[in-house]
Image (cartoon, rainbow, N blue to C red):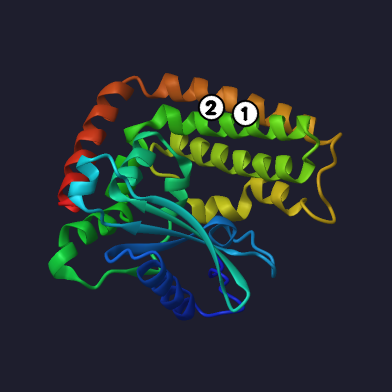
Amino acid sequence: MKEIDFYPITKEELVRKALAYVKDKLKIDNPIAIYISGSRLRRWNTEKSDFDLFAIVKEDPEKILYGKFTSQEKHFNIDKIGVDLNIKGFSLLYKMIINGDPNVIELFSEKPLWTSEDLYRNEQSLNLIKWLNEPQGHDTVLQANFIRFVKAGAGMIKSAKKKLQHHKTIRASKDLATAALWLDYADEAIVNESFPNPEYQMNVSEAYTLRRRIGDNALTEEEIPQEIRLLEEKATILKEKAYAKNVDYDEQSRQSRAILSAKFVRAMG
């Protein structure tokens, strides 16, 4: 597995300036962790790719009581290099997991670029972050909503169809690449009954081939429908496999959600 490409800046500079933006510009005083995401996490980036970062922050409990959840998406530049920053509090991170969002699978496939050093304020939050990056945490996340996770690839195929209707060929191709990757994650999870290994999938899956065909060798508007049909067939087969194999799905889901709820409550305290 090749290393994440931080060119043309260093990992340290990226983290330092991202933290400065979060604390000074956005006035968020207690970030907990920063992860790389997007094309650079998947090793799909080109020389012109922006950086996608995911920041987890600890929310003020009083604001949560009033329904004020932390969620922001910001774009800023570091020496003319674009950075897309997605900021989530623990409450919305929990919701992503419970909803079976495959982005969570990718997010915790790599260790964070940075974590808070304030153990006094954030010990339980940091314990949660560490656990989410470990095999036991991976499996609990996966089982929290396994069927929804398997279905996510089909949802991305629908997104590609809509874009194709508006002749947005490149965007449709990108959605198909993501759908293929998510279906590969689901396939591995069903076969191995464990958290899929994005490090393996990002290198060998058909998604990688699809993604590489964006640009000079992009899928044409005539080729995309055939890719859609193939992926739809795969999605249908995977859903049938998932339902057949997970006969105790409801009980596993309840147990996993109970574990996650307890850990997130402690982390947010």
x and y percentages locating residue 55 in the rendered image: 39, 59
Taking 59 as reference, is 80 left or right? right
Residue 247 or residue 93, whichever sits in front: 93
Residue 214, placed above or below residue 66: below
Which residue is pictured at 33% across the width and 24% down the height? 249
The residues bearing labels 1 and 2 have C-alpha atoms spaced at a distance of: 6 Å
Which residue is pictured at 33% across the width and 56% down the height? 133
Residue pointed to by mark 1: 234
Asked if the residue under mark 2 is in contact with the one under mark 1, i.e. CB atoms within 8 Å, the reply is: yes
Residue 13 or residue 141, whichever sits in front: 13
Q: What is the crowding at mark 1: few (fewer than 14 residues within 10 Å), some, or many (at least 20)? A: some
x and y percentages locating residue 183 in the rendered image: 56, 36
x and y percentages locating residue 212 in the rendered image: 73, 54
Taking 38 as reference, is 173 left or right? right
Which residue is pictured at 34% across the width and 57% down the height? 56
Tag of residue 238: 2
Res. 23 visible in picture: yes
Element under disc 2: helix
Residue 241 or residue 67, whichever sits in front: 67
Element under disc 1: helix
What is the quadrant of the N terminus in the image?
bottom right
Res. 139 visible in picture: no
